[in-house]
Image (cartoon, coloured by chain):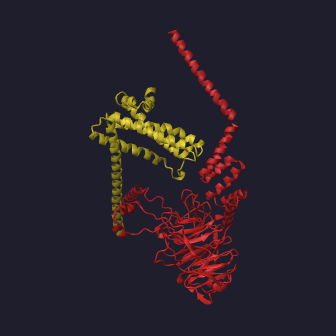
Chain colours: A yellow, B red
Amino acid sequence: MNREALQHPLYVMVHPFNGYWDLKYERSQKTSLIISFGILFMLILTNVLGDQYSGFLVNMNNPRYLNSLLEAVYVLVPVLFWCVANWSLTTLMDGEGKFVEIFITTCFALLPIVLINFPWIWISNLISAQESSFYYFFKNFAFLWSGLLMYVGIMTVHQFSPSKTIGTILLTLLAMAFMAFLTLLFFSLVQQMIAFVSTIYQEIVLRR
Amino acid sequence: MVARIKKLRTGLLALCCLVSLGLGGELALAESAAPSYNYSYWGNAVAAPSAYEATTLITGASSGAGPFNNPQDIQVTADQQIYVLDSGNNRFVILDQDYKSVKTVDAFQFKGKAEKFNNPQGIYVTQQKEVYVADTGNKRIVHLDSSFKAVGIIEAPKSELLQANFEFQPVRVAVDKADRIYVMSAGVFDGFMEFGADGVFKSFIGANRVHVDAVEYFWKSISTKAQREQMVMYTPTEFTNLDINDEGFLYATNGDDYGDPIKKLNAQGADILRREGYYKPSGDLLYSTRSGGAPRLVDIDVSDSEIYAVLDASRGRVFTYNGDGYLLYIFGGIGNRLGEFNTPVAIEHSGDDILVLDQVLGEITVFQTTEYGRTLNSAVRSYYNGDEAMASREFSKVVNLNANMEYAYAGIGKAYLRQGEYKESAEYFERSMDRTNYSKAFLLYRKEVLRGHFSTIMTALIALVVLWQGLRMYRKMKARKKVELH
């Protein structure tokens, strides 16, 4: 992996149209995939660090209930859901993107959140309550930037028109909600089944 | 075979555990906590030393006035005489400091006629020892002077504010220094009834707000007038009790599940209770339906320094807050031991002691402060009176007795802030989770540090800029040389 490949995510951040085009047609997919996992890992890491080390004035977490594993789940599950939902939809809607490409695009779009929020973990320890609006401004700014990147990325990867992209994104969100519902239903059913089996087992064992 | 079943069982158990993981969490309830507890910033019940302990039980028999029958209200005067309203016996009994009966009043003279009470529900004693009794059965308020002769009687008022079928059923009464009379009347949803010193009805004050949920609002908005008339009427919650403090502010409790169950009303009837604490004053935060459900606040008592205590009838607990709305301590309970009640109905303070009246048992439980309670009370009082140095000392003692008392750390922090010890101050405010004050202390501390190291910081900055510029020039020169060479 060369220096240029590592710098490419930064290039995508400021030149999304060219950057994503290069990502789809020019770059080695394997390298991009490794970088994508790196970005996801960094996002998890910054979330964990942020919850633990953010300044007292902006940190509303109860330190007793911080769970780094859950923190990872909160990042991975939405990303996975997003990718699966988007892929399932766009295969039906003539999107050109493959699943790997969608995944890479999504991960690259998350970079601003990592890069903007990371320094603020430490800067937030040096600000007062009045200045905390800067903190929240930059947090929101990072999210908006990521959203924009995501939009351009999806548009490029599927070769969609702008309006179709918006429609796709909205449908994807709907599909994500549907998936979440199905998952919950599935787990709840499995739980019921296990409870049923265990009750029967207990009945048999105790009847002896 | 057995081993296999055992293996299977552990496997199944592990599976069940895995699946149920995260479902049953957070069931830590107040009742499983230590006997005495407080709520932390995070809303958990944490153990606390008891601030009050029950010492004496007063019954009608022990006081020498004969057994109480269904007493409803008590009132303590400044010189610590206790007025017990013995509703079942249609009388009130006055006890002295040693809890011995000194007088029993069951009849009074009015306009030359001997009159009696009929199931009175509320009593109030002014500083001049004039007695106001809400004589519920007779639908009137009786005003007796200090020698228990009737001065005036307030009957059902006439006013265009009142409906034609209005029934005057006074159940609680309070009187301010200007002799304005505030009456809580059963079946009245418009707030307290306010009477002038002459007994003339003036207006209602402090009505609770109606809570309407969105679904209900939607149905009401699309239904016709005839349909609306068939629907459930939404009326504001009734008050459950009231008390008045030295400055003439009304403190009231109500059974409101959505709004604020405790209110402090000014003369206009606006709620001005300070709710600066970790959460709104409302009794228990954690409860289960098994232990009586949501708190049902039935009485409130204001003592000096804006400290007020409310009585929760569903769990028999007394919650004491300071003027800012921080929960100070909790004690009491439902049960058969000393310090527990069956049906608590009224709470009063007598000096630093707290008295709780039990309606069914006809007993008054006297609670006295422990060392912890005394220290905490004195800390809150010193702070209220502006003596921050004293408050800080007392709060230090409090945290020595109870390290979980987050509020006390703020008291220490404030004293440090005043002394200019900003770093320590910020640390203490952080421990008490007081973000506003932390920010203040932190700003001052930051300024101090920046001032102290101004020369170092500036030197480093300038050195960095010079270094960077130098590096740039060096690189440019190198590049130019390369070009010249080629």
Judge left or right: residue A2 versus residue B105: left
Name the residue: 51% across, 41% down: A137
Question: What is the residue that sits farthest to the front in this orientation?
Answer: B160
Does residue B212 lie above or below A164 as drawn? Answer: below
Question: Quadrant of the image for the N terminus of chain B?
Answer: bottom left
User: Who is closer to the viewer here, A208 or B99?
Assistant: B99
Which one is in front, B160 or A70? B160
Quadrant hosting residue B138: bottom right
Identify which residue is drawn at 54% across, 59% down. Answer: B44
Residue B98 location in percent, x, y? 70, 80
Q: Position of residue B466 (x, y in %)?
A: 62, 24
- Closer-to-camera residue (B111/B108): B111
Relative to B473, residue A172 above or below = below
Q: Is residue B63 left or right of residue B88?
A: right
Q: Disc count in the image?
A: 0
Image quadrant assignment for residue B367: bottom right
Q: Position of residue A103 (x, y in %)?
A: 37, 38
